[in-house]
Image (cartoon, helix red, strand yellow):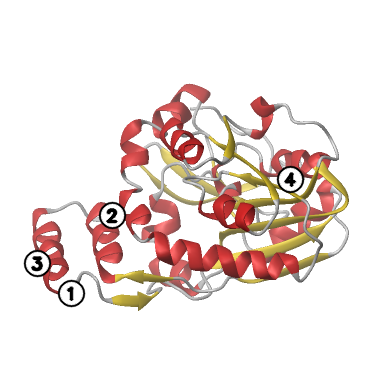
Amino acid sequence: MVNLNSCPLCQQKNFQRVFKKGRRQIVRCLNDNLVVVNPKPTREEIARLYSPKYFRSLNPYLKDHQAHLKYFRQKLDQIEKRIKKGSLLDVGCGWGFLLSEAQKRGWSALGIDLSYSAVASCRRQGLKVKQGTLKTAKLPSRNFTVITSFQTIEHVTNPLVHLQEIYRLLKPGGLLVMTTPNYDSWTRILMGENWFGYRHQEHLFFLNPAVVRLLLEQAGYGKIEIRRDDQRVFSLSYYLTRLAGFYPTNIVKTASDVVKRVLGNLPLPILTDPWGDILVFAWK
């Protein structure tokens, strides 16, 4: 673990502990309200977080592929209302749900992802993907009309640097589209230390709309639009599998398996929090 001596956003050193469990401590900057894991994992510890086991844990997500395709079609509709089609970069593209839909619509689409299996899956679909991160991809400046970053910024080691790199890659007038869990959501307030956002050990930052705006402004973005994200409709089986993963006891697993056999395919709107994710449109 490495101590974070100052806030990545304001460079101040005035932190207040939110809570601590084991070696994992969450703190809040009293100057700008950025919430961060401190001390943060080393590079080697972060690499271990993204082991094959982590990517296998995403299997419930992959099974509801129709829900994701519908969601990303909606996102592309929203993007195309704001900017003309051109080149699109999807940061953290996963298994290519957005990329495949964008390619069908005539976008020149490229993805980046850490997962070898996700990248291989995308390439089997005929999608253009680079394995790695924004830093390792070494892409040319002013090259993309739109850059998407869905549920990614909370994973990076420095959110301001992440947004600055995206800014560099965007063409003048280009658009960033981003989502991230909302630290101000009522589920976080009610659940406290047990909030689902905290349970993902790979989440290093926790943002609310005001902090997201500060980060974007400091990174150089002009017009900024921030609102709550749209709902997705997953199957009951998805929620039960995730619940069993969060609470890995025999009782929870057995009860989950029984209900899944009977009602697993029942479609349900998102149960956690319809205000739980922030959606951002920000122009260079």
Residue 109 in the image, given as x and y percentages of width and height:
67, 46
- The residue that label 1 is drawn on is 263
Under tag 3, what secondary structure?
A: helix
Q: Is residue 158 visible?
A: yes
Q: Residues within 10 Å of mark 3 (few under 14, many from 20)?
A: few
SS of the residue at dot 2? helix
Of marks 3 and 2, the one in the foreground = 3
Neighbourhood count class around disc 2 (C-alpha, 10 Å): few under 14, some 14–19, many 20 upward? some
Amino acid type assigned to the residue bearing label 3 in the image: Val
| Tag in front: 2 or 4 | 4
Q: Are marks 3 and 2 in contact (CB under 8 Å)?
A: no
From mark 1 to mark 3, how far is it between C-alphas? 9 Å
Q: Quadrant of residue 89?
A: top right
Depth check: give the residue in front, 44 or 191. 44
Which labelled disc corresponds to residue 246?
Answer: 2
| Separation of residues labelled 2 and 4 (CA atoms) | 30 Å
Separation (CA) of disc 1 from disc 2: 20 Å
Label 1: state its secondary structure: helix
Which mark is first along the chain, 4 or 2?
4
Q: Secondary structure at mark 4?
A: helix
Q: What residue is pinned by disc 3?
A: 258
Nearest to N terminus: mark 4 or mark 1: 4
